[in-house]
Image (cartoon, helix red, strand yellow):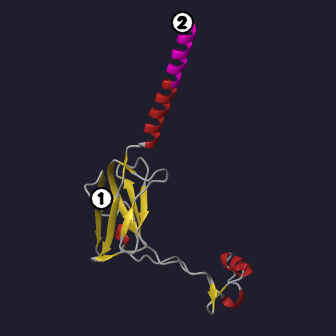
Amino acid sequence: MIFSTFLRVVGMTRQVLRLAVLLALAAVVGCGGGHKVEGEVTLDGKAVEGAIVTFVPADGTGEQAFGATDAGGKFTLRTANQKSVPAGNYKVIVVKGEKSQAFQKEGQKLSGDDYVKAMKGGGGKGGMMMPSAPKSLLPEKYATPAKSPLTATVPTSGLVKLELSSK
């Protein structure tokens, strides 16, 4: 009887130990030390819709965080692996390009064969041409970490306001 009680206690201890290990692992994996980062982008005081905001670690190591702006210029950042951003200092870049145009001739899309010819430089039927690269709709100074004057520190103390200027 004492031996069977001992085995039950040992079995329960193992279960408790397993549960404790699982909870500890869940806490480590689930709480990656990240912070929710939200903000808004304006250009000359007007909300910028459809821009991509990227936080690039200032020291050049670690993951970048990114998000897209909505109609009100608001964004929420995430990394490739989680919906939060690690603490640290960041260079901030903001880009927005025109929507790419489909290959067209007189308002109609190209067939698959014409598209392939255009991609190879053949131009397809009737001298169709490939569209040029999308034009940047924001000043170029915000497009690269080396040029961007924008910086941020995570964790933030509220909404990150990125006020861009066309000048």
**SS under mark 2:** helix
Label 1: which secondary element: strand
- Give the crowd class for mark 2: few <14, some 14-19, many >=20 residues within 10 Å: few
Q: CA distance from mark 1 to mark 2?
A: 67 Å
Spot occupied by residue 133 in the image (x, y as percentages of width and height): 52, 76
Who comes first in sequence, dot 1 or dot 2? 2
Residue at the disc numbered 2: 2
Number of marks in the image?
2
**In the picture, which quadrant includes the C terminus?**
bottom left
Q: Which residues are magenta?
A: 1-15
Q: Nearer the viewer, residue 161 or 149?
A: 161
Residue furthest to the front: 1
Q: Position of residue 94 (x, y in %)?
A: 38, 67
Q: Position of residue 31 (x, y in %)?
A: 41, 42
Which residue is nearer to you in this view: 105 or 85? 85
Query: The N terminus appears in which quarter of the rendering?
Result: top right
Q: Which residue is mark 1?
A: 151
Q: Which residue is found at the position 40% from the left and 61% from the top?
A: 54
> Which of the 4 image quadrants contains residue 149?
bottom left
**Left or right of 103 in this view: 49:** left
Prevailing secondary structure class for the magenta stretch in the rendered image: helix
Residue 64 shown in magenta: no
Asked if residue 88 is positioned above or below residue 91 in the image, the reply reads above
Specify the amino acid type for callout 2: Ile
